[in-house]
Amino acid sequence: MAASHKEQLAPYVAPPALLYLSSPSGTPTTATSLSGSGWQVAGAAGAVLLVAAAVTALVGARITRPLRTLTAAAQHMSAGGDAPPVRVSGQDEVAVLAGAFNTMAANRVRLERARKAMVSDIAHELRTPLSNIRGWLEAAEDGISDGGPELTALLLEEALILQHVVDDLQDLAMADTGALRLVVEPVPVAEALDQVRAAHEPRAAEAGVALSLTVAPNLVVHADPVRLRQILDNLLSNAVRHVPAGGSVSLTATRDGSDMLITVSDTGGGIPAEDLPHVFDRFWRADKSRTRGTGGSGLGLAIVRKLTEAHGGSVAVTSTFGEGAVFVVRFPGRRGVR
């Protein structure tokens, strides 16, 4: 059956294909001949290697050049200098790193300027009372002053100024480091604000400034009563100080949803628009001459902001120059207090 099957399929099957592993004549060969010359193959391989080396060098230089620039800038900064901005090109990881370095360098310059300005301001605030104390003591030593009760009162006043500056700086330092501890409890707003108004009313009356108080009924705020009083004292004394005789300062408390708002508004000279962003900066004063007749240490409003933020709240100011200023302190509901 197998033989019959092969015989039937024979007309339809192609003849066998022959595969020669040597030349068709049967002569054995000892080498395989490649197309072209061996030098051509070596030249092509060398050209490929040169191109690959050139591309690698270009890519490596493109990557390492900004890294070398960043390294030089970082070394310059570590030596105490101000690093110039590093040129940023592209959107790859190196460009992102260069952008972050530029931001860090700019923030460092800004913080260094702020530090120098703060040191200068602190020196200025301490120099004046210390100079006064030294002058009066030298006068008493030389016999120019009799050293009576009047001198004692003057020295006490200057010592209190020094103590006030030191206490303010300590409060700010504690707030910055998170070491400020609050004893939060329910505080009746009407009672707290009435105490503040009564404490500042004699000084306001002496300056010819009218104080008014408006409190919504049944208001209670969860706050540290001592720090709340400090916030209100700073805001109210600041307002009375900058209102001329015949003006007025109003203290109001209202509720905004679950939040409680305390507003201190005055009819003073207001704050120029260019100064509004700096109102809560340390040692900032509206009076650029820095005289104590028109301003305190310049730390009161900075303390107001820090203490308010410690309660989880915020403070904002709006003002039209020549028409007074409005300070709004927002205390959140109890869940917002830290």
Image (cartoon, helix red, strand yellow):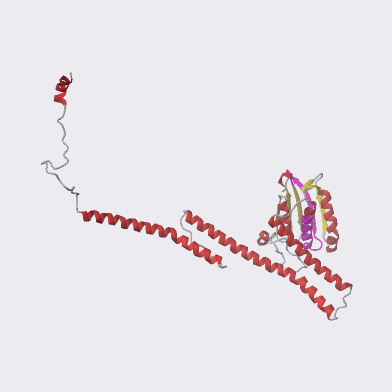
* Residue 249 forms part of the magenta stretch: yes
The magenta span reads 230-259
As drawn, is 12 to the left or to the right of 306?
left
Q: Determine whether 337 is above or below 4 in the image.
A: below
- Please tell me which residue lies in front, 294 or 100: 100
Give the image location of residue 164, x and y in percent: 78, 63
- Please tell me which residue lies in front, 285 or 146: 146
Q: Quadrant of the N terminus?
A: top left
* Residue 122 forms part of the magenta stretch: no
Question: Splitting the image into 4 quarters, where does residue 18 fall?
Answer: top left
Q: How many marks?
A: 0
Res. 224 visible in picture? yes
Q: Determine whether 214 is above or below 280 in the image.
A: above
- Please tell me which residue lies in front, 243 or 194: 194
Q: Residue furthest right?
A: 149
As drawn, is 120 to the left or to the right of 85?
right
Rendered residue at 57%/62% (across/down) = 106
Rendered residue at 70%/62% (across/down) = 282
Give the image location of residue 55, x and y in percent: 36, 57
Q: Determine whether 245 is above or below 182 in the image.
A: below
Give the image location of residue 163, x and y in percent: 78, 65
As drawn, is 74 to the left or to the right of 144?
left
Res. 84 visible in picture? no
Give the image location of residue 301, x and y in percent: 73, 59
Q: Residue furthest top?
A: 1
